[in-house]
Image (cartoon, helix red, strand yellow):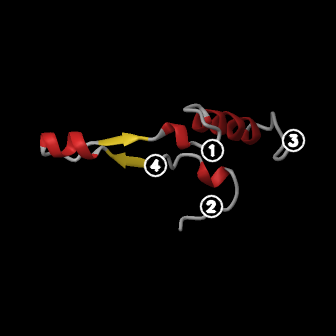
Amino acid sequence: MDVKDGFIGTIGNTPLIRLRKISEETGCNILGKAEFLNPGGSVKDRAAWFIVKDAEEKGLLRPGG
């Protein structure tokens, strides 16, 4: 089991799912990125995290504030 230490640890680790039928039909390993499994249910999770992190590093936002 892959257990993350908090919400932030889940960002950027979107699971890939093997698309079995099309993989078998093409002879290629076809993967789909399961964006719906992101912690916030959005493709914007990673972008939002980097915006907050950048603001903290520039002193515009205090960590936890």
**Count of picture labels:** 4
Q: Amino acid at mark 4?
A: Pro
Q: Give the x, y percent position of residue 23.
A: 21, 44
Q: Amino acid at mark 1?
A: Pro
- According to the image, label 4 marks what residue? 15
Does the CB distance between marks 2 and 3 fall below 8 Å? no
| First reached walking from the N terminus: tag 2 or tag 4 | 2
Does the CB distance between marks 1 and 4 fall below 8 Å? no
How far apart are the two marked residues, 3 and 4, measured between alpha carbons? 30 Å
Secondary element type, mark 3: loop
Secondary element type, mark 1: loop
- Residue 30 vertical placement versus 43 (above, below): below
| First reached walking from the N terminus: tag 2 or tag 1 | 2
How far apart are the two marked residues, 2 and 4, measured between alpha carbons? 14 Å
Q: Give the x, y percent position of residue 43.
A: 54, 32
Does the CB distance between marks 2 and 4 fall below 8 Å? no
Q: Amino acid at mark 3?
A: Gly
Q: Amino acid at mark 2?
A: Lys
Residue at the outermost front position? 21
Which residue is found at the position 53% from the left and 68% from the top?
Answer: 1
Does the CB distance between marks 3 and 1 fall below 8 Å? no
Q: Residues within 10 Å of mark 2 (few under 14, many from 20)?
A: few
How far apart are the two marked residues, 2 and 3, measured between alpha carbons? 22 Å
How far apart are the two marked residues, 1 and 4, measured between alpha carbons? 11 Å
- According to the image, label 2 marks what residue? 4
With 47 as the anchor, is 61 left or right in this view? right
Q: Which mark is residue 65?
A: 3
- According to the image, label 1 marks what residue? 39
Which residue is found at the position 40% from the left and 47% from the top?
Answer: 16
- For the residues carrying marks 2 and 3, which lies nearer the camera in this image? 2
Is 17 or 63 nearer to us in this picture?
17
Query: Looking at the rendering, which quadrant does residue 3 occupy?
Result: bottom right
